[in-house]
Amino acid sequence: MTRPQASIAIQVLPFSAGGDEMLRIVDKVINYIKSTGLKSVTGPFETVIEGEFDKLMDIAKECQLICIREGAENLLTYIKIAYNPNGGTWSIDEKISKHI
């Protein structure tokens, strides 16, 4: 089994946007993440993505830019990173399959 080099959990909070507008912006970010073709799982607080480290960092940056382009004046972003360039890190499936 080939393990992904890295995985990230990302949560964007565009605070300048209220209620439905905040959800609209978050939905744009989630749709972008899904469009990358990488394995991802979205939960109620964050989306987890796995793949090559540099690609994941590019995706994290683009998530910020999407929020700003969509009208957020400012935002908070929480990112957790698991990274192992040599042996890979546990996949999403390895982490959660026994709980599904």
Image (cartoon, rainbow, N blue to C red):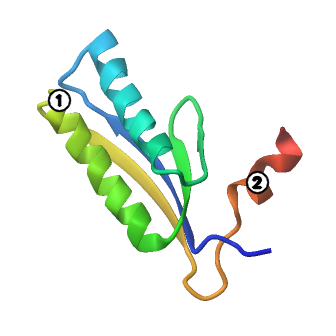
Label 2's element?
A: helix
The residue at 55%/84% (across/down) is 85
Label 1's element?
A: loop
Alpha carbon distance from label 1 to label 2: 33 Å
Tell me the quadrant of the picture where the N terminus can be found: bottom right
Within 10 angstroms of label 1, few (less than 14), some, or many (20 or more) residues? many
- The image shows residue 21 at horizontal and vertical percentages of 27, 15
**The quarter of the displayed image where residue 22 is located:** top left
User: Do the CB atoms of the residues marked 1 and 2 lie less than 8 Å apart?
Assistant: no
The residue to which callout 2 is attached is: 93
Name the foreground residue: 39 vs 72. Answer: 39
11 w.r.t. 8: above or below: above
In the picture as drawn, the residue positioned furthest to the top comes out as 20
The residue to which callout 1 is attached is: 72
- Label count reads 2
The residue at 43%/34% (across/down) is 31
